[in-house]
Image (tube, coloured by chain):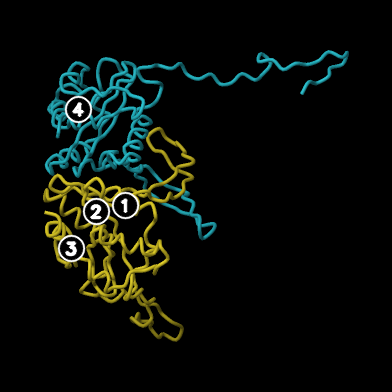
Chain colours: A yellow, B cyan
């Protein structure tokens, strides 16, 4: 709608006058601007829909302190706190085998900081390995467009190195040496079962 | 310490005078008054501590709406809601194989109401079976002191019967026919891996 200004001059909306929309971050085709979590959720949904594997992300562990029941049907949690996860985020079954992994992304381009992992998670993964499960980490270097599949047994030595006073991160070339790189695809976006087929079957 | 009363009479503490302690609920030796969840948590902790299996209960899924950050370190969830679980409560790894189950207890003595399960859970268990996972339900009849291990493939027909208009529960004798009963023990309390060894290995 045109608004009349004093003096008969009409106001005409121009793009310059409009509130600037928040600019989208530039699209990187290697990564398509999605988070690793989105890529993985999309991928495991694809696996599930096509009867390829049943893998789920675990719910965030929460300590519930107070709950309100306004109606019998709907409970509202009024007070709760995040708990430190004692396991990894993802697990499930593929060809009868137990699959367990943790996924982390970093904006770094030269190394991955080990502070991204909890001690509990490392213990959990070591326990899974003892039970002959397929256990690994997925690390995405978002700015490099590189996603690495690293079997836990090849990742754990970096953790042990830190524990015994060594560096607190893993360099990109160290990761490249022990990983299988997962290419980005359309559907599924991050077909990490290819790495499992290659390395475990 | 003895307290002097007027008239020189000494006050002596007696058990009768002490505030009565909350009476413990009577011990039933069949069940020992524990909930199925307590028994299972105790059992999987035993398995973990003895490197027998790595099985965890999944966190309750919660939809978080509002979080308060009074300090950088501690986040307080102010509003959240329970979500319907899309999977079962327990999963993990035993001898490399994927293990997945749901556990329910009932106070009934003649039948188990199928309304204890969600449709989503049944679909999930059917999916796990297709992936060749070890999948089952554990049903405890608390008043009978009976805990039944039922492979999913033997339990699912009861669900299908209900879906096609049949009865909404499973009678105790139907359950006894298809189940392996898990005896109560001291440590672990509910050694359900015995049933897995018997039925799957």
Quadrant, the N terminus of chain B = top right
Q: Earlier in the sequence, mark 1 or mark 3?
A: 1
| Label placed on residue A189 | 3
Q: Nearer the viewer, residue B30 or A6?
A: B30
Residue A32 in which image quadrant:
bottom left
Residue name at image x 23 percent, y 29 percent: B194
- Which one is closest to the eye, mark 3 or mark 2? 2
**Mark 4 surroundings within 10 Å by alpha-carbon count, few (fewer than 14), some (14 through 19), many (20 or more):** many
The residue that disc 1 covers is: A88
Q: Earlier in the sequence, mark 1 or mark 2?
A: 1
Residue at disc 3, secondary structure: loop
Q: In whole angstroms, how far apart are the C-alphas of marks 3 and 4?
A: 37 Å
**Mark 2 surroundings within 10 Å by alpha-carbon count, few (fewer than 14), some (14 through 19), many (20 or more):** many
Residue at disc 1, secondary structure: loop
Q: In whole angstroms, how far apart are the C-alphas of marks 1 and 2?
A: 10 Å
Residue B148 in which image quadrant:
top left
Q: Earlier in the sequence, mark 3 or mark 2?
A: 2
Query: Where is residue A27 drawn, in percent x and y?
Result: 25, 75
Residue name at image x 34 percent, y 44 percent: B61
The residue that disc 4 covers is: B150
Number of marks: 4
Query: Where is residue A34 drawn, in percent x and y?
Result: 26, 66
Q: In whole angstroms, how far apart are the C-alphas of marks 3 and 2?
A: 20 Å
Which chain does tag 1 point to? A
The residue sitting at the right extreme is B7
Which chain does tag 4 point to? B
């Amino acid at each position: 709608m045109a608004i009349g200004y004093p003096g008969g001059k009409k106001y005409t909306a121009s793009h310059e006058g409009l509130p600037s929309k928040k600019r989208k971050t530039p699209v990187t085709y290697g990564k398509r601007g999605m988070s690793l979590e989105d890529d993985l959720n999309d991928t495991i949904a694809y696996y599930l829909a096509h009867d390829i594997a049943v893998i789920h992300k675990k719910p965030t562990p929460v300590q519930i302190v107070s709950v309100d029941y306004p109606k019998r049907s709907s409970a509202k949690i009024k007070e709760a706190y995040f708990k430190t996860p004692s396991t990894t985020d993802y697990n499930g079954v593929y060809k009868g085998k137990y699959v367990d992994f943790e996924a982390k992304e970093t904006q770094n381009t030269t190394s991955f900081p080990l502070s991204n992992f909890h001690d509990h998670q490392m213990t959990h993964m070591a326990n899974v390995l003892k039970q002959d499960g397929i256990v690994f980490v997925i690390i995405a270097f978002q700015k490099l467009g590189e996603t690495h599949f690293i079997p836990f047994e090849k990742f754990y030595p970096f953790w042990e190195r830190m524990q015994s006073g060594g560096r607190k991160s893993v360099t990109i070339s160290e990761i490249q040496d022990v990983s299988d790189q997962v290419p980005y695809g359309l559907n599924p976006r991050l077909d990490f079962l290819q790495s499992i087929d290659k390395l475990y079957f």
